[in-house]
Image (cartoon, helix red, strand yellow):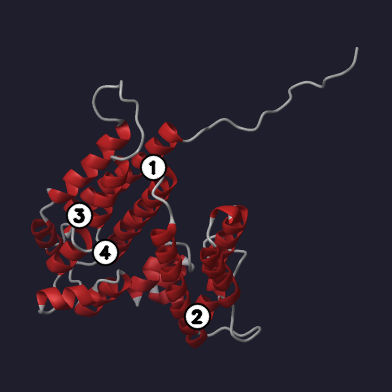
Amino acid sequence: MDALLRALADQGQVEPGYTLPEMRAQLQPIETVLPTIVFDSTQPGSLRSIINELFRLGSIVRDRISLDTWRIILSIDEDFKPLRSGQVNLADLLILTDELLTQLAAFSGSVGDSMTRTHSFRFLELGRRIERSLRIINLVKMFFVPLADVKGPLLETILEISDSLMTYRSRYLANLQLAPVMDLLLTDETNPRSLAFQYERINEQVSQLPRDETEPGFTKVQRIAMSLTHSIRMTDINSIADAHCLLDFRPFERITSDWQKQLHQLSQAIALQYWVHSGVAHQLTDIRRE
């Protein structure tokens, strides 16, 4: 529970006081506060606010998305609301979030199956993979860095959040251990939820972006993408896990911080190379008849 509350606080979902047991007793119970926060549309980071933004953006590009995709967006916007007016509890929230996960999977499948593979798809895929990479890194840092002896229930929780628990059980057939969990979440290129898999997809999409063929060598975007892929392939996850168990968090913090920095650099490089940054034209003086 402490690790989960720490993760929520780090993302701005709950007050930092919930991470401290002595302060938590003075605050409202988390089971009362959390459902209210999720549906609070005045909070920019709440789930309801994100869905509102999804609906707004979908409305803007309504003529560029299929009817089926638009129906899913409408369904998400209409369904993710408290079941009873003025009352929100954890049981209701669990039902609604389970339905939301199904709808989001349908939305992702619709986009993946129906969108033509133009440069628009490549940029969409790049944004998705960069965001997921940052989410994976933040997740493992929040769960692993403060703790030396990571217990089984916590490892099971992070695998469940990462949708990798079934893969772990079918592959390792053993008790939950730190090194295999780290491997599955970070360096396993066959796991679609791993960091290495995201880097592979980023590298694949970057290689197909347009570029000036008269320029020698690789572009900055290509160099960063290749650097990320090479870095994670060269990572010795066993030595990092061993150091972690000895309370030496430096190797893990160093490499994850480097990955975060490079991902932000990649995002900025893509924006600088491919986006138009000219603003709306403004008239500096009034035009008057002489």
Give the Cα distance between marks 2 and 3: 36 Å
Please tell me how crowded label 1 is: few (under 14), some (14-19), or many (20+) other residues with Cα within 10 Å: some
User: Which residue is tagged 3?
Assistant: 252
Give the Cα distance between marks 1 and 2: 33 Å
Quadrant where the N terminus sits is: bottom left
Quadrant where the C terminus sits is: top right
Give the quarter of the image for residue 263. top left
Type of residue at label 2? Leu
Q: Could you say where residue 236 lies in the image, as x and y percent from the top left?
A: 10, 54
Is 193 drawn above or below residue 256 in the view shown?
below
Give me the disc on residue 267: 1
Q: Could you tell which of marks 2 and 3 lies nearer the N-terminus?
A: 2
Give the Cα distance between marks 3 and 1: 23 Å
At mark 3, the secondary structure is: helix
User: Which residue is tagged 4?
Assistant: 146
Give the quarter of the image for residue 49. bottom right
At mark 2, the secondary structure is: helix
User: Which residue is tagged 2?
Assistant: 96
